Image (spheres, rainbow, N blue to C red):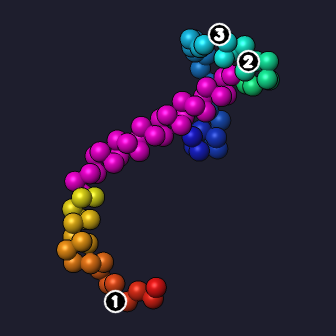
């Protein structure tokens, strides 16, 4: 959500169904429910994008790992650590 934080994002009113006890408690604690829901959704989007990327690139990652297992790291002899 970095892009949304740096630029003014357009906010859209949305209806959500939330656990009533949780909502009461959040309001009693002074929690901004809209911002908290947005933060939770942003985290869920981030995680799903990560999962999708790993799934989409699984073959390339496996191939790279197999190469390194069979041949070692390229230019390993030049490493100083």
The residues colored magenta run 33-60
Location of residue 80 (image quadrant): bottom left
Say if residue 10 shows up in the picture. Answer: no
Mark-to-mark CA distance, 1 and 2: 59 Å
> Of 40 and 4, which appears nearest the observer?
40
Dot 2 corresponds to which residue?
A: 25
Taking 28 as reference, is 79 above or below it? below
Q: Is residue 40 above or below residue 72?
A: above
Residue drawn at (65%, 28%) of the image: 36
Disc number lying in front (1 or 2): 2
Q: Which residue is mark 3?
A: 20
The kind of secondary structure element at disc 1 is helix
Marks 1 and 3, how far apart at CA:
62 Å
The CA span between labels 3 and 2 is 9 Å
For marks 1 and 3, the one nearer the N-term is 3
Res 70 → quadrant: bottom left
The quadrant in which residue 8 appears is: top right
Quarter of the image with the N terminus in it: top right
The mark that comes first in sequence, 3 or 2, is 3
Residue 70 seen anywhere in this rendered image of the structure:
yes
Mark sitting on residue 77 = 1
| Element type at mark 2 | helix
> Could you say where residue 55 lies in the image, as x and y percent from the top left?
29, 45
User: Does residue 12 appear to the left or right of 72 in the view shown?
Assistant: right
């Amino acid at each position: 959500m970095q892009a949304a934080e740096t630029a003014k994002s357009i906010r859209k009113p949305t209806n959500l169904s939330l656990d009533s006890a949780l909502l009461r408690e959040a309001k009693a604690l002074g929690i901004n429910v809209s911002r908290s829901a947005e933060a939770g959704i942003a985290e869920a989007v981030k995680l799903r994008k990560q999962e999708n990327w790993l799934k989409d690139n699984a073959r390339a990652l496996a191939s790279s790992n197999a190469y390194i297992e069979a041949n070692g790291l390229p230019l390993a002899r030049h490493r100083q650590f």
